[in-house]
Amino acid sequence: MLKTVMKKQHNIDEVQEPITSASPEVRQIIEQVWHLEKSRLDKKSLGHINEDILAIVKEAVK
C-alpha cells in the first residue's frame, strides 16, 4: 500500500515538474488560465475561451 502511495506521489511530482520549474511569469499565466477554466467549469460555460487566454498572455508579457 505504501508503495502505491509513493508511486502516485511520484507521478504527481512528474506531472507538475514543468509547472514548478517554470519561470514566475509562466507560472502566473498557468495559474490565471487554471482559475479561468475552473470558473468556466463551475458555471458550465460552453463559450470559447481562446480570447480570454490570449488576454491573460498579453497582459503577462507587457
Image (cartoon, rainbow, N blue to C red):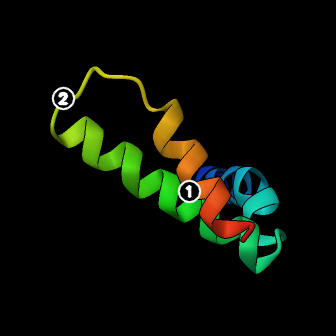
Q: Point out the residue furthest to the bottom here.
A: 24
Label 2 crowd (10 A; few <14 / some 14-19 / many >=20): few
Compared with residue 10, is residue 48 higher up or lower down, i.e. above or below? above
Say which amino acid is labelled 1. Answer: Ile
Q: Residue at x 44, y 32 (%)?
A: 49
Residue type of the residue flagged with mark 2: Lys
Marked residue nearer the N-terminal end (2 or 1): 2
Q: Which residue is most to the front?
A: 62
Instruction: Relative to 17, say whether 46 is above or below.
Output: above
Q: Is residue 42 visible?
A: yes
Residue, x 66% and y 68% (percent of image)?
60
Residue on which the image places disc 1: 56
Q: Which residue is mark 2?
A: 44
Quick check: 8 left or right of 18? left
Q: Closer to the observer: label 2 or label 1?
A: 1
Q: CA distance from mark 2 to mark 1?
A: 21 Å
Q: Nearer the viewer, residue 26 or 50?
A: 50
The percent position of residue 56, horizontal first and vertical second, equals 56, 56
Toward which corner of the image does residue 46 lie, by quadrant? top left
